[in-house]
Amino acid sequence: MPYHWILFDADNTLLDFTGASRKAFAQAINELHIPHHPDLFARYKRVNHIVWTELEKGQIDAVTLRKKRFELFLQDIKIDRDPVLFNKLYLDNLVQHSELLHGARPLLDHLHGKTKLALITNGLKEVQRPRLKHTGIDQYFDVIVVSDEIGKSKPHPDYFDHVFQEMRFPDKKKVLVIGDNLHSDIKGGMDYGIDTCWFNPDGQVNATDIQPTFQAKNFEEIQAVVS
C-alpha cells in the first residue's frame, strides 16, 4: 500500500457526529424542559462552531469550552438553565446516540492489517473513547489521540508531534491524513508536511487556499486513494 500509516479524523469522517449531536441535543432539551423550537439546534451549532474554533486557535481551553458553548446558547435563547448540567446531559446522550457513517466499517475492515491506522480527534475525553467503544471501532486503531487528553488540538503542530511520537516517528511521506475539516484536518496535515485527503461527501466548494492532496466524496474513493 502507498501509505504505512493512515490517520483518520473521527467526527463526520467515520462517526455520524451531526446525527448523534442532533439527537443528543434534542434529548437534553427535553430533559431540561426547554420549550422546543425548530431552530434551536441550528442556533446551538453556530455557537458551538465559534467556541470550537476558539479552542483550535488556542484562545480557550477544553474546560472553558464545555461551559461556554451552552452558556452562550442559553443567553441567545434567553432561557435560564445550568450550562454545566446542559453540557453533561448532552455528552452523556452523545455517547448513546453515536453511530458510524454508512460504509465506514467496510473501509476499516479492508484496511485493518494491511496498514497501520491511527485516530486523531479534537474531542472531549469523557466522550470520545466511550463513543469509539460504543461503535466498536476502537479495535481497529494502533494509535488513538484525543486532543483533550493531551491539551493540544488539531491543527496545532504540537498535536501532530504527539501523534508522531505515538507512531514512533514514521516517514512523513508514508503517512496520510483523512478528514472532513479543511482547517483542523487538512491544513494541520499540510503544515506538518504530510499528504491529506479531504472527505467531502456533501460536495462543498473549497473557497480557501487550503489544497488537499486528494479529495473523496465517499468511502469507495478513499479506498481507491489508499490502495
Image (cartoon, helix red, strand yellow):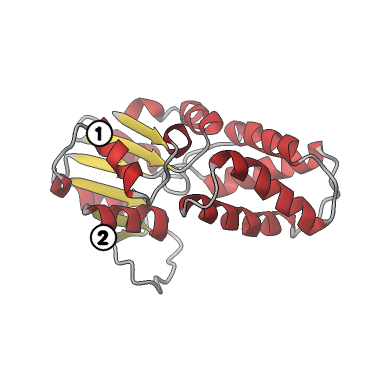
In what element is the residue under mark 2? strand
Residue 74 seen in the figure = yes
The residue under the point 39% across, 60% down is 182
Front residue of 115 and 144: 144
Return the residue at label 2: 214
In what element is the residue under mark 1? helix
User: Residue 186 is drawn in which quadrant?
Assistant: bottom left
Residue 22: where, in percent of width, then height? 65, 47
The residue under the point 34% across, 58% down is 187
User: Residue 63 is drawn in which quadrant?
Assistant: top right
Residue 126: where, in percent of width, then height? 55, 29
Q: Residue 2, which numbered label?
A: none
Disc on the earlier residue, 2 or 1: 1
Q: Residue furthest front?
A: 59
Distance CA(mark 2)–CA(mark 1): 25 Å
Could you tell whether 43 is left or right of 110 in the image? right
The residue under the point 24% across, 48% down is 176
Return the residue at label 1: 165
Residue 168: where, in percent of width, then height? 19, 31
Looking at the rendered structure, the kind of residue marked 1 is Gln
Badge nearest the viewer, 2 or 1 = 1
State which quarter of the image contains the N terminus.
top left
Residue 77: where, in percent of width, then height? 80, 57
